[in-house]
Amino acid sequence: MSSDERIRNRRNFRSPLLLIGLAMTVVYLFLGAYILIDKSFLPAIPVEFRNIFAGMLVVYAIFRGWRIYQDYF
């Protein structure tokens, strides 16, 4: 098998992982933004902890998006 064929096979295998990674990045980003915007979501948790958790979700989404960008583009 030539190296060109191996590269093509590797790209075909990684495409589903790229889609899953992008979907999870969007989910983390959306959930973090939703928690920050909607104050009635998770009412039993104090506001400070909810905001910290939402901020961590947004930061992790940015980090995950950067890793996907580095790996695939």
Image: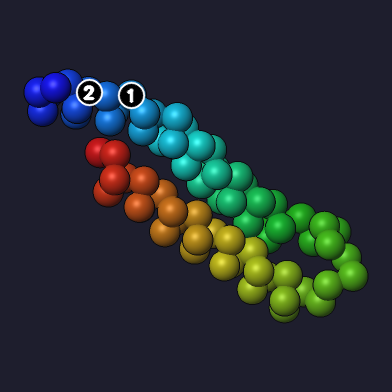
* Left or right placement of residue 65 versus residue 2 in this view: right
Residue, x 60% and y 45% (percent of image)?
27
Q: CA distance from mark 1 to mark 2?
A: 6 Å
Residue 59 percent location from the top left of the image: 49, 63
Residue named by callout 1: 12
Tell me the crowding category of disc 1: few under 14, some 14 to 19, or many 20 or more residues within 10 angstroms, Cα based.
few
Residue, x 79% and y 61% (percent of image)?
39
Residue closer to the observer: 8 or 65 = 8
Q: Which mark is residue 53?
A: none
Residue, x 71% and y 58% (percent of image)?
35
Cβ–Cβ below 8 Å for labels 1 and 2? yes
* Left or right placement of residue 4 versus residue 10 in this view: left
Residue 53 percent location from the top left of the image: 65, 69
Is 30 rendered above or below residue 58? Answer: above
Tell me the crowding category of disc 2: few under 14, some 14 to 19, or many 20 or more residues within 10 angstroms, Cα based.
few
Mark 1 residue element: helix
Is 51 rendered above or below residue 15? Answer: below
Residue, x 27% and y 24% (percent of image)?
9
Residue 11 percent location from the top left of the image: 28, 28
Residue closer to the observer: 26 or 40 = 26
Q: Amino acid at mark 2?
A: Arg
Say which quarter of the image contains residue 38. Answer: bottom right
Q: Amino acid at mark 1?
A: Asn
Residue 15 percent location from the top left of the image: 38, 29
Direction front: furthest residue: 1
Q: What is the quadrant of the C terminus in the image?
A: top left
Residue named by callout 2: 8
Mark 2 residue element: helix
* Left or right placement of residue 31 versus residue 9 in this view: right
